[in-house]
Image (tube, helix red, strand yellow):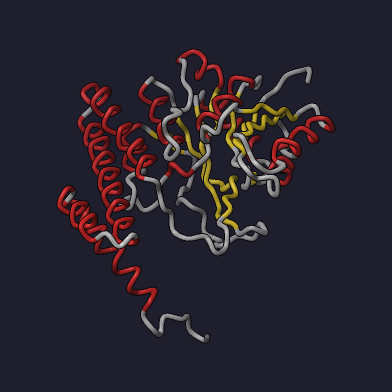
Amino acid sequence: MAGRVDVSVVIAAWNCAGTLEAALDTALGQDGVSVEAIVADDCSKDETAARARARGDADARVRLVQNPVNAGPAAARNRAIDAARGEWIAVLDADDAYAPGRLRRMVALGAEKGADAVLDNLREVDETGAPISNAPFLSLKAPEQWDLSRWAMDNRVFEARRCTGFLKPLIRRGFLEAQGLRYREAMRNSEDYALIADLLVRGGTVWALPEPGYLYTRWSGSTSHRYKAAELQAVVDFARDFEATHGADQDPDTRGALRRYRLAIENAAALNDGVMALQSRRPLGFLRAIAGRPRALPLFGKWLGEVIGKRLPGRRSAGT
């Protein structure tokens, strides 16, 4: 594709043949900016790569890159970023969508503020694209600049009202290249949080828009999040390393925020270990998880209360 590219949309794709083309439609249909879409196939076992290749044959704005082995979304996005030509990098998951005008609004704010990354609000939708709620994910009234302290505090798992790590960034490619920044490939969860934290600690500026431009698909019948222990441990390792490496150089509020983020992740990992032990009928494993992380005990109580509440009779909504 010749000519200027404003935004390279990177799509990490794994076994998503049924949703990929709809996601591409919303990326390529953005108005007011020139767009390319780079699909990074992560060794899918379905027709994902074939559909991306066919779409590229029909539209030069679409390109396919492929990981040689399944390596997770961070590695797939990095492969796409390496191939990108746009001034900005935008992230899109293969089962999600962009609202009309999203990228135009984000690029405009980035240009106005000289931002290195721009975030916007999201709206949860079902698999048909219908809003699950009319309320946006975050209560923002106007564009805001976010610092590292707020970013860490807003990503405390089970403690923050809404984890802003769910937001999908628009990032200035020149900043990524100048700083040698990429997604941390050891992380299969919280990788967007880590990238923005790395950007902020290197002096990057982050702005957030109140408009919900990202449509996050919540599939019906999906269960609550369950994590593999190794995946959560990678997030714990990141939180500890980041605090140890950068915490001393921060102001007191930011140091405190990084500490609280790290504690929240450690508590979440302990909760996950305990829940998995109970579900596997290993009571000793549950007791070890509690004993090893007593600060996570309130989370166990909250989880248990939710489980009991779901199983008690008379929990149907009114009128059913």
Tell me which corner region of the image, top left, top right, bottom left or bottom right, holds residue 274.
bottom left
Out of 210 and 12, give the one closest to the viewer: 12
Residue reaching furthest to the top:
178
Left or right for 289, reference 202: left
- The residue depicted at 35 percent of the width and 44 percent of the height is 229
Residue 173 horizontal/vertical position (percent): 56, 21
Residue 296 horizontal/vertical position (percent): 22, 53
Left or right for 187, reference 99: left
Q: Compared with residue 205, is residue 221 higher up or lower down, i.e. above or below?
A: below
Q: Compared with residue 275, is residue 41 higher up or lower down, i.e. above or below?
A: above
- The residue depicted at 64 percent of the width and 46 percent of the height is 97
- The residue depicted at 53 percent of the width and 35 percent of the height is 73
Tell me which corner region of the image, top left, top right, bottom left or bottom right, holds residue 203.
top left
Quarter of the rendering occupied by the N terminus: top right
- The residue depicted at 51 percent of the width and 27 percent of the height is 113
Residue 110 horizontal/vertical position (percent): 55, 28
Tally the marks.
0
Tell me which corner region of the image, top left, top right, bottom left or bottom right, holds residue 67.
top right
Q: Compared with residue 74, is residue 269 higher up or lower down, i.e. above or below?
A: below
Out of 48 and 121, give the one closest to the viewer: 48
Residue 76 horizontal/vertical position (percent): 56, 30
Left or right for 70, reference 164: right
Out of 113 and 58, give the one closest to the viewer: 58
Residue reaching furthest to the right:
58
